[in-house]
Amino acid sequence: MESVAFKLSRHTIDRLEALARDEDVSLGQIIRAAIDRDLRRRDEQRFPERVEERLLAPIRARVTEDFLAADTWRTLKQRLVDKGYALRQSGGGLALHDLVSGRFLCRTSEIGFGYPALMKRFCEPFPGHTHTWIIDKLGEVPLYAKG
């Protein structure tokens, strides 16, 4: 293992030391475990494998009407929840996940509904999406109240 030096606030160090005492491990073990968990989480979010077409077809058939009928993010999310799906950020786009297990199913672009097109249609980014700059790349998107 290599050594790395970095600074933490006194408050953070105190909390980490308390966790280490509670778990009867070293401060280093607590920090390494936290970093490992964060890296795994980031890897899982960034690049899920491309889903095979034979698995996409039933999902596409089940949700296409919902994607086409929804006129807001809220409506789309609710329609998908009603069918057992969760819509979540995935890198610079969106992905469908199983509502109960949280398991990644596919990117919305893989079933014909890319994030930029949805954002343009709903006139706003997906709520909580961290890539809000994407809307600037779409050019002039009229923001208006839906009636």
Image: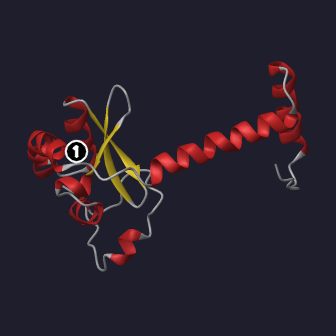
Amino acid identity at mark 1: Leu
What's the residue at 27%, 41% (across, down)?
77
Look at the picture and state if 18 lies above or below 70: above
What's the residue at 35%, 51% (across, down)?
49
Quadrant of the image occupied by residue 16:
top right
Residue 131 in the image: state x and y as whole percent: 45, 63
What's the residue at 81%, 48% (across, down)?
1
**Side (left or right) of 87 relative to 26:** left
Quadrant of the image occupied by residue 137:
bottom left
Residue 40 in the image: state x and y as whole percent: 57, 44
| Farthest residue, direction front | 1
**Classed neighbour count for the residue bearing mark 1: other residues with Cα under 10 Å, few (<14), some (14–19), many (≥20):** some
Residue 7 in the image: state x and y as whole percent: 88, 54
Look at the picture and state if 42 lies above or below 23: below
Specify whether residue 16 is in view.
Answer: yes
**Side (left or right) of 136 relative to 106:** right
Residue 58 in the image: state x and y as whole percent: 12, 40
What's the residue at 29%, 79% (across, down)?
140
Which corner quadrant holds the C terminus? bottom left
Colour pattern:
secondary structure
Q: How many marks?
A: 1
Mark 1 = which residue? Answer: 76
Specify whether residue 147 is in view.
Answer: no
Query: What SS does tag 1 mark?
Result: helix
**Side (left or right) of 48 relative to 17:** left
Quadrant of the image occupied by residue 143:
bottom left
